[in-house]
Amino acid sequence: MKVAVYGFGNQTYYRDVLKVSENLGGEPPYGGSRMALEFAKAGHEVFLADPRMDTIKPEFKQKLLDAGVKLTTDDVEAAEGADVAVLFTPFRSGLTVKIAEKIIPHLGKDAVIATTCTMPVLVLETSVRNVLFMEDREDVGFSTLHPAAIPGTPQHTHYFIATNELLEEEIVKPHQIEKLKKLAEDTGKEAYLIPAELISPIGDMGVVATASAAISALEYYAISKSVLKTTKAMTEFQLAQAFQVVSSIIAKYGIEGLVKFLNAEALKKSLKSMLFDEKVQKVAFAAMNSLENVSDIEEIVGSLEDMASKFEPEEKTFLSAPSPMLISYMEELAGEDVTRGVVREALKKLYHGENN
Amino acid sequence: MKVAVYGFGNQTYYRDVLKVSENLGGEPPYGGSRMALEFAKAGHEVFLADPRMDTIKPEFKQKLLDAGVKLTTDDVEAAEGADVAVLFTPFRSGLTVKIAEKIIPHLGKDAVIATTCTMPVLVLETSVRNVLFMEDREDVGFSTLHPAAIPGTPQHTHYFIATNELLEEEIVKPHQIEKLKKLAEDTGKEAYLIPAELISPIGDMGVVATASAAISALEYYAISKSVLKTTKAMTEFQLAQAFQVVSSIIAKYGIEGLVKFLNAEALKKSLKSMLFDEKVQKVAFAAMNSLENVSDIEEIVGSLEDMASKFEPEEKTFLSAPSPMLISYMEELAGEDVTRGVVREALKKLYHGENN
């Protein structure tokens, strides 16, 4: 396959900020360049494009050249006829969208654009939809080759590939998913097929929150069966409400709002009556431990009390309204097409942080 | 004050299921009857209404009578001229709404109806709004005397009282909140004033999930500052998205959907790269520990793999669309009044478990 990888990976960030070699192991270069290296070693024709190629250490470039990777600063050259384009481009979404728009006309027929950890695939797909139409390139599919780890570290044993499951409109065709799967497996990684909307919550850094929430849900479900003997519907309501409220507060009011509205003292008092089984409720006990030793977090983020006292919400909102139910009402009100557009815009708005 | 308490509290559940005396301490009767007892001891005129009063142990009734509580099976008798009505009525929401509708015409002027742990105050307020209008009783306010613990246990040192903060439309007046605060403090409890929408997530059993999510958010924010050096906006996006997705999956597809879509193996692989500091990331490390020892939960809920393989989603939905942004679009589309109604209906629909 012809593969175009965009973005070398910020080696300074890996070395000086994350201290990857010491903390996680492996050796540089990490990131997009490592993915390119591995694809080339697996026998594919690989281009690696980065506008700042001249700032890259010569020894890293040599490693790539030795493996047969073609280095370029020209995004279009890399894209020409490619089967797969992998975007390991910067987090700032504007840049990634621009690169995608530029390369789309040049990709091979039925190519697939795969985002990684730097941008949710649905945000990208929505952002470039007009270009696909204008350029008559609706053959191009969208999915991910999400490493869900830093490529080049021993933790990187897998790729998450986005599927259409749960989506109303398909973004990728089966043969495009097969290409990505082959690419992953050719490098000796395990390929996980995951619904597109879940790639980012499971694969990105926020997985710490996704996993904690999901496990706390399972723990509570277990306790509701073994101790509380409450109905499953009641348990599910409480869980959906809890996460909806925490999500809405953060989306609308940020971390400061969370600290202000979820009064730590009140949480602690209430949580105390709900700890029954340390073996089953590992996460809930850890949350209590954290609440009782909140200075461990305050040493880094500063006093929570100060944060709460300084925060004043600008606008009111409804915090506990569940999205899936809102969406079904919106469909009744405005039809499916409008709703789909609104949902996409809402996601983009959140992603671009326009509400912070 | 004249106080009417509805619902004695299910003593069999406290004794045989939760084993409250052994596990948490204190002595029966627990629940609504204990609240009534404490209000009476604090010098208030208290009625306790329960349709099944004849099934209550004579010694419990005697305790209440000795404290001056008036026992009745007649909801209206208890309500007549009351300043405060406390609903410690069953979880099944239909019943609580019916009691509220029945008593509203009989309450004293400017009375306040306080829900407890059995029903979210906003669901009740929405459900009886027509009756308030028809009976010309819009003087009646709605708030909570949420014990956030089992009344009668040593853990019950506090009441959560719902405020209008963050609500678009007020549900309670300042002097009504003062009444509830006085009632709480007269019994020696601490009164926490909390925005109405947060009472249920903080006070109900699901607090295990709320606290776990909130703490994992703070932990991630700390790590994003100390280790990852990512922007606050990016951190907040990831957090809002993570909890939105977990909430939406549970609201739409239940626990089985959660188990199916949040692939435990994928979560584990991804989480492994995000554990940096055991002292700061207590909840995230506990989540990993739980993922690695998932049999502790499976012993109670059964095999997660079986659960996932059996589940087939009926309908697709958008999982990661953030509620606050959806709501602001809905306001543009349909106006504020429609939106307010839709949000309320969405919440009721979730509460009644019609989507499970």
Image (cartoon, coloured by chain):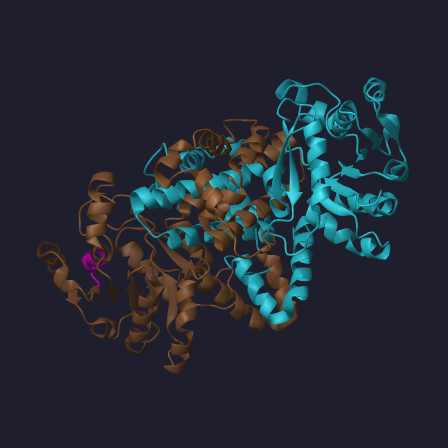
Chain colours: A brown, B cyan
Residue range (magenta): A36-44
Residue B184 among magenta residues: no
Determine if residue B25 is in view: yes
Q: Is residue B248 above or below residue B337?
A: above
Among the 4 quarters of the image, the one containing residue A235: top right
- Coordinates of residue A241 in the picture (x, y in percent): 59, 47
Task: Check the picture and name the quadrant holding the N terminus of chain B.
Answer: top right
Q: Is residue B35 above or below residue A167?
A: above
Residue lying at 41% horizontally and 35% vertically, measured from the top left: B292
Please count the marks in the image.
0
Residue in the foreground of this view, choosing between A124 and A244: A244
Residue A41 among magenta residues: yes
Residue in the foreground of this view, choosing between A174 and A201: A201
Judge left or right: residue B320 versus residue B231: right
- Coordinates of residue A118 in the picture (x, y in percent): 33, 58
Among the 4 quarters of the image, the one containing residue B75: top right
Residue in the foreground of this view, choosing between A345 and A251: A251
- Coordinates of residue A31 in the picture (x, y in percent): 24, 54
